[in-house]
């Protein structure tokens, strides 16, 4: 259904609309991350890894995030996953969305642990829906999503949500060993996100491993020269 936005457009405008849609969905994902921060019940596994690196090495959290992100991009390339406009948009727009909602601060301060857990679970649904909404464009995934898909392609008998759970559990273990903050939200993200991803993708009849992603050079060529 979403594909109707760009399905019948000429190649150049097809890619432009896909890029705009991806930017919107990344902004949407940024809201999900904002909710996790506001819930304040523990870092999700990848964020915990950023914190762990910043503790072990004399670098800031942001520097750790960039370093880990670039390292995962290299792993993605080694696993033959394409790096495309979706990867770049992910790197820019998720952070902008999170910063925007942090500045707007639409969610009041929460004191009840039950409310915090509910908000955190809502964030997992937002992240899963956002992943579907941008992956369907075929403009390549963000570094961590591309890694999950790459591993999933090599473990076809395992659902993509279970693959995500396994990766998150490994990342969480490394983060804990480095001294990162682990809480209820961390555990929920490890086991809950994979389950929600499976449910969301099944509901949308979407299999991310079947999407043929376009690399950044191909997208640029089509936009600049209007070629297929």
Image: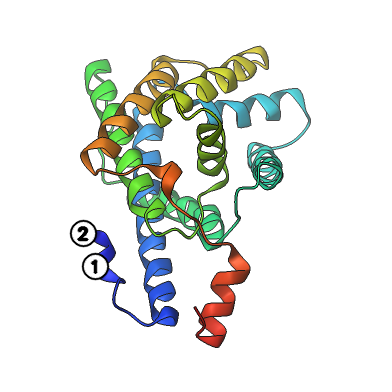
Q: Quadrant of residue 64?
A: top right
Which residue is at the front of the view, 31 or 40? Answer: 31
The answer to whether residue 113 is above or below residue 147 is above
Q: Quadrant of residue 194?
A: top left
Rendered location of residue 30, percent (x, y): 40, 48
Rendered location of residue 39, percent (x, y): 34, 28
Verify CB contact (< 8 Å) between mark 2 and mark 1: yes
Q: Residue at x 32, y 24 (%)?
A: 195
Element type at mark 1: helix
Coloring applied to the structure: rainbow
Q: Exactly how many numbered labels are in the figure?
A: 2
Q: Quadrant of residue 61?
A: top right
Rendered location of residue 148, percent (x, y): 52, 35
The answer to whether residue 172 is above or below residue 136 is above
The residue to which callout 2 is attached is 1
Are there few (<14), some (14-19), or many (20+) residues within 10 Å of tag 2?
A: few
Residue 4: numbered disc = 1
Instruction: Describe residue 33's horizontal placement relative to residue 180 as left or right.
Output: left
Rendered location of residue 173, percent (x, y): 59, 14
Q: Residue furthest front?
A: 157
Q: Residue at x 46, y 51 (%)?
A: 94
The quarter of the image holding the N terminus is bottom left
Q: Residue at x 64, y 15 (%)?
A: 179
Element type at mark 2: loop
Residues under labels 2 and 1: Cα distance? Answer: 6 Å
The answer to whether residue 156 is above or below residue 25 is above
Instruction: Describe residue 125's horizontal placement relative to residue 18 as left or right.
Output: left
Residue 119: numbered disc = none
Q: Residue furthest bottom?
A: 225
Q: Residue at x 26, y 46 (%)?
A: 106
Are there few (<14), some (14-19), or many (20+) residues within 10 Å of tag 1?
A: few
């Amino acid at each position: 259904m979403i594909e109707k936005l760009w399905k019948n457009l000429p190649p150049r405008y097809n890619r432009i609309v896909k890029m705009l849609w991806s930017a919107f969905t990344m902004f949407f994902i940024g809201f999900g991350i904002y909710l996790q921060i506001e819930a304040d019940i523990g870092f999700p596994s990848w964020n915990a890894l950023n914190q762990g690196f910043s503790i072990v090495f004399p670098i800031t959290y942001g520097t750790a995030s960039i370093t880990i992100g670039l390292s995962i991009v290299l792993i993605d390339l080694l696993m033959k996953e394409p790096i495309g406009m979706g990867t770049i948009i992910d790197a820019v727009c998720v952070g902008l969305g999170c910063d925007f909602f942090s500045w707007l601060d639409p969610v009041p301060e929460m004191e009840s642990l039950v409310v915090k857990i509910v908000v955190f679970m809502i964030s997992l649904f937002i992240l899963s829906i956002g992943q579907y909404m941008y992956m369907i464009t075929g403009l390549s995934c963000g570094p961590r999503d591309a890694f999950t898909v790459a591993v999933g392609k090599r473990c076809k008998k395992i659902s993509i949500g279970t693959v995500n759970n396994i990766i998150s559990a490994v990342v969480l273990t490394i983060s804990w060993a480095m001294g990162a903050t682990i809480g209820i939200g961390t555990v929920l993200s490890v086991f809950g996100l994979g389950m929600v991803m499976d449910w969301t993708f099944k509901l949308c009849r979407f299999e991310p491993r079947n999407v043929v992603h376009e690399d950044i050079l191909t997208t640029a060529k089509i936009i600049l020269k209007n070629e297929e």
